[in-house]
Amino acid sequence: MKIKDLILALLVVIVWGANFTVIKLGLGGVPPMLLVTLRFTLVAFPAIFFIKPPKVSLKYMLLYGLTVGVGQFGCLFYAMHIGMPAGLASIIAQLQAFISPILGYVFLKEKIKPKQLVGFFIAALGLLVIGIASSANGITSVPIPAIILTIGAPIFWSISNIITRKLSDKAKDNNEQLDMLSLVVWASLVPPIPTLILALLIDSPQTLISSISNLSIISIFTIFYLAFGATLFGYGFWNILISKYPLSMISPLSLLVPITGLLTARIVLLEKLSKLQWVGVSIIILGLMVTNLDFKRIMPMFSKNRIKEL
């Protein structure tokens, strides 16, 4: 991976890591499905008046909008609303890093290298360590529906990754380049209607109107952060990376999200990282190094002749 793309990926990871703390703050004043609705409405408007629609079929536009907006974030926001802790949610959501390469292998015929399998296993171990350390009261203290919904989020995220890659490959076959920002903006027209319907089924119209009428500064900041930071910037550039590299290389980078998420929670919510959590962080970084570093290029640098030259 090119250095500039790696830096871009790390910036996305930082924004997404803070995302879980921001979501938790936002849910304190806005019902979950209404928060999803406002998020994607702000992403779409007024941007659609300035950005041309992407050259993709309506079918794929609907599929992408439904998997990301309704599936991924509908599940995640409601799960956090009914009892899923932000830290644990950031960890479970990274199951995407393992689901996406598998789906890429099945649907896109992408190969998974042995070193990537080793890296996946190491990173999964680190994820498990952080999960054990983060749930001091045990996962049984979290409602079962919240756990199921949270697991659903990375499944839908992985499906959206496959859709993005297929659209990118189709564009390349036609000697074109898919406009990822345009895809994110125009696909954001899809979630608001179904999520608003779900919001009306869960909460009364009076509750929703009251929430909008009494938006706090924190709620407004949350909506803008989710729309412009996590969605436009995050998914815009994430999709660009997916179009350039195999899913088995890009998806594992999301395993850094729990790390930045825990650090953000430490700064904003004054949550402390335990020694065991730091062990998990170190294991994940090791797994990512194994997955992404090109050891064939690195090892010659440490050969005897090369060392003598230095």
Image: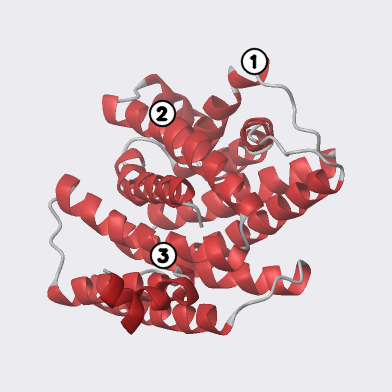
Q: First in sequence, mark 1 or 2: give its number.
A: 1
The label number, if any, that marks residue 309 in the structure image: none
- Image location of residue 165, percent across then percent down: 70, 54
Amino acid residing under circle 2: Phe
Q: Residues within 10 Å of mark 3 (few under 14, many from 20)?
A: many
Residue under the image location 49 percent in, 52 percent down = 2
Q: Is residue 201 left or right of residue 121?
A: right
Q: First in sequence, mark 3 or 2: give its number.
A: 2
Q: Residues within 10 Å of mark 2 (few under 14, many from 20)?
A: some
Q: Secondary structure at mark 2?
A: helix
Q: Real-space Cα distance between discs 3 and 2?
A: 25 Å
Residue receiving disc 2: 224
Residue under the image location 45 percent in, 78 percent down = 119
Looking at the picture, tell me which residue is in the foreground, 154 or 290: 290
Give the answer, above or below, for where 115 lies relative to 74.
below
Q: First in sequence, mark 3 or 1: give its number.
A: 1
Residue receiving disc 1: 50
Q: Is residue 243 left or right of residue 225?
A: right
Amino acid residing under circle 3: Leu
- Quarter in which the C terminus is drawn: bottom left
Looking at the picture, tell me which residue is in the foreground, 136 or 175: 175
Give the answer, above or below, for where 79 lies relative to 213.
below
Amino acid residing under circle 1: Phe
Q: Are marks 1 and 2 in contact (CB under 8 Å)?
A: no
Residue receiving disc 3: 255
Residue under the image location 48 percent in, 42 percent down = 234
